[in-house]
Image (cartoon, rainbow, N blue to C red):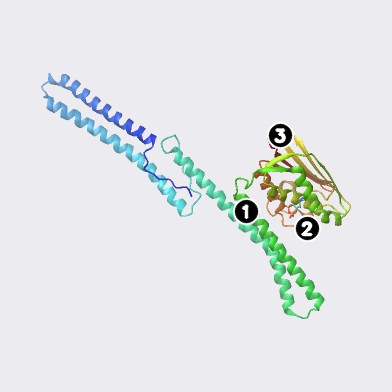
Amino acid sequence: MNKFFTGRRTKRGLLLFGIGVLVFAALIAAASITVAVLNTFFNDRGFDAYTISFIALSGFALIFTVTIVTLFYFEFRKAQIIIDSLNRVAEGDYTTEIQYGRRDAFSRIYLNFNKMTKELRSARNMREDFVHSFSHEIKTPLFSIQGFANLLLEGGLSEEEQKKLLRIISDEAGRLFRLADSTLILSKLESQQLLGENKPIKLDSEISDCIVLLAREWDEKNIEVSADLEPLKINGDSSLLRQVWLNLLSNAVKFTPEGGKINVSLKRSGNFAVAAFKDSGCGIKEEDLPHIFDKYYRSETAEGVEGNGLGLAICKRICALSGGEIAVSSKPGEGSEFTVSLPLKQ
Ligand code: ADP
């Protein structure tokens, strides 16, 4: 937590104090000159020096007091607006904004105040959006678990049927666990601004390790996997990036039919390492393309395929945290290609 203490003598405070002293000295000088001028002018007309000085100084005092009171009144009003606005934010009204015209001593406070309420609004929207999506996503597996558990409670089922229902319940519980895990990972990544670890990584060996790790999945579907990996190094968090490679590879396997092909390449392009994952799978419809990196988004083609629509959102966040980006090009029926660009180690 950052703590700031007010009341310190800053340079600006000293400057203002200096200006105040100068203005006060200038006022005394102006008052003395005025008294002197009025004395020479009115002495001939029968006014004594004392009366002239009294009238002139009273006039000055009046003008000075009115000016100071007016200035204080306007500054106090501005401070009051800030206090009222802060009170409204403290009561939970994040729509509060301070409208201001010309630049003055409070402009930076107004600007930062408006920035703060904007941040608070977007954090609240994100939280509401997250709660809404998450509660929607957990309903389907929960309904299945409840429905099948009720069937079991009613009784009258053979041992075989009971086992089948218990398996479904166990699978749905597993889905819930994975959903909770992925949601936690994503919300942690979203609140993170920097990589936890920034160490040299041999991208080619990381990616080929991941291909081997998923060998059972692509082998079971008789998918032909080829790799063309240029040896390239970057700085980053290897365990986070591993999630990107595994997600993209497992998506390629999931959405490619039996006997299909997957090609993985790693090439240098300028100051970037570009990893491409190309498959000969079902592809993605044009209307789905802008949404596939959104949280919980799954296209119609994903029906019946294991997943929760968080994998690509996680990949996108990890790429952004690593200073890179992820893109997709795809045509339905012709397959998809996901490319990840990451800045090379300089
Ligand atoms: P999940 O795979 O768990 O559904 P993702 O976030 O990884 O979630 O992917 C979001 C959606 O993008 C998928 O449901 C699918 O519709 C689409 N998609 C992702 N990768 C591919 C791919 N290689 N081929 C076809 N569609 C894909």
| Front tag of 1 and 3 | 3
| Front tag of 3 and 2 | 3
Q: Earlier in the sequence, mark 2 or mark 1?
A: 1
Amino acid, disc 1: Ser
Q: Earlier in the sequence, mark 3 or mark 2?
A: 3
Q: The residue tagged with tag 3: helix, strand or loop?
A: loop
Image-based side of 139 in relation to 110, left or right: right
Say the numbered circle drawn on residue 8.
none
Amino acid, disc 3: Asn
Amino acid, disc 2: Glu
Q: Are marks 2 and 1 in contact (CB under 8 Å)?
A: no
Q: Residues within 10 Å of mark 3 (few under 14, many from 20)?
A: few
Q: Nearer the viewer, residue 273 or 85?
A: 273
Gap between marks 2 and 1 measured at Cα = 25 Å
Residue wearing tag 2: 303
Gap between marks 1 and 3 measured at Cα = 30 Å
- The image shows residue 148 at horizontal and vertical percentages of 74, 72
Residue at figure coordinates x 74%, y 75% from the top left: 151
Q: Is residue 44 above or below residue 99?
A: above
Q: Is mark 2 within 8 Å of ligand 1?
A: no
